[in-house]
């Protein structure tokens, strides 16, 4: 019976205690008994805890971990109504190419960091007027949101500490941060400039001027 339940959970991107209760079809089963069952699955390596009360089966992980949208899906499960941005998107688009980066997402909620056996998931808070520039898709039934390349670059630089100190007259921002911006289209550049104007940030205005002077010359 317990093996059958676990097999049923293998098709789900995540499950909760209530999910197990429904599969048991016994409302009288206590919460502590279900927690004990889940604990035994985790100890046996059959279940992966994502965060408190949220789990994924090892089988689901093994079947889907190589999919490009798997990590964004996990990010959306941990904090719904967030969008993946910054280094993850820039690497995916070839703007950053040297190393593998953790998942960073943007939210209107408080900043959080989740660390589990699947990786480190960081959430940055942004003000409401800048909570845009992303598109939705769906992966195994989970809505996921990912920033456009222009918004990912904006977020990457917007949240970067001490950047204003370096924006001197002869500073080459893209070279110093090893950003490959050659493939940015005119539309991408216009979108980036729009977020800079929207932000009303002196730092981001200087960033835009630097990029226009060094890599986005007419």
Image (spheres, helix red, strand yellow):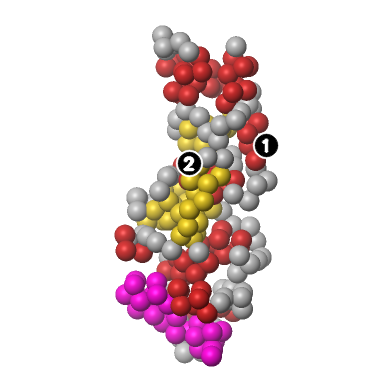
Q: Give the residue number, with chain letter if any, for mark 2.
A: 77
Residue 169 in view: yes
The circle on residue 155 is none
Q: Nearer the viewer, residue 186 or 64?
A: 186
Q: Which residue is mark 1?
A: 62
Instruction: Give above or below for 73 relative to 97.
Output: above
Callout 1 secondary element: helix
- Residue 209 part of the magenta-drawn span: yes
Measured as percent of width and height from the top left, residue 82 is found at 43, 51
Image quadrant in which the N terminus is located: top right
**In the rendered image, the vertical position of residue 113 relative to residue 192, given as above or below:** above
Label 1 environment density (alpha carbons within 10 Å; few <14, some 14–19, many ≥20)? few
Q: Quadrant of residue 205?
A: bottom left
Q: Is residue 43 visible?
A: no
Query: Is 126 contained in the magenta span?
Result: no
Compared to 55, does 160 lie above or below?
below
The residue lying toward the viewer, choosing from 34 and 7, is 7
Q: In this rendering, would 106 be left or right of 138?
A: left
Helix, strand or loop: magenta stretch = helix
Q: How would you rate the neighbour count of disc 2 (Cα within 10 Å): few for under 14, some for 14-19, many for 20 or more?
A: some
- Name the residue: 61% across, 75% down: 183
- Which region of the structure is painted magenta? 193-218
Q: Residue at x 58, y 18 (%)?
A: 5
Which residue is depicted at the point 37% across and 56% down?
Answer: 125
Q: Residue at x 42, y 77 (%)?
A: 193
The x and y percentages for residue 33 are: 47, 13
Q: Earlier in the sequence, mark 1 or mark 2?
A: 1
Q: Give how far across and how far down residue 16 sits, in percent.
A: 47, 28
Whether pointer 1 and pointer 2 mark residues with C-beta atoms closer than 8 Å, the reply is no
193 sits to left or right of 117: left
Residues at marks 1 and 2, CA–CA distance in whole angstroms = 17 Å
């Amino acid at each position: 019976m317990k093996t059958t339940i676990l097999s049923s959970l293998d098709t789900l991107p995540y499950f909760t205690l209530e999910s197990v209760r429904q599969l048991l079809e016994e409302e009288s089963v206590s919460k502590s008994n279900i927690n004990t069952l889940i604990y035994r699955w985790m100890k046996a390596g059959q279940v992966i805890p994502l965060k408190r009360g949220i789990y994924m089966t090892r089988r689901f992980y093994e079947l889907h971990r190589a999919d490009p949208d798997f990590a964004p899906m996990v990010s959306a499960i941990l904090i719904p109504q967030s969008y993946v941005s910054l280094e993850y998107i820039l690497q995916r688009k070839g703007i950053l190419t040297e190393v593998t980066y953790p998942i960073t997402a943007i939210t209107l909620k408080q900043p959080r960091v989740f660390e589990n056996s699947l990786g480190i998931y960081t959430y940055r808070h942004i003000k409401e007027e800048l909570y845009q520039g992303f598109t939705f898709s769906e992966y195994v039934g989970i809505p996921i949101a990912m920033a456009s390349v222009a918004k990912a670059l904006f977020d990457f630089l917007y949240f970067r500490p001490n950047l204003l100190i370096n924006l001197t007259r002869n500073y080459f921002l893209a070279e110093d941060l090893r950003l490959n911006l050659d493939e940015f289209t005119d539309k991408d550049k216009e979108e980036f400039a729009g977020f800079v104007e929207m932000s009303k940030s002196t730092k981001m205005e200087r960033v835009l001027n630097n990029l226009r002077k060094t890599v986005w010359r007419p």
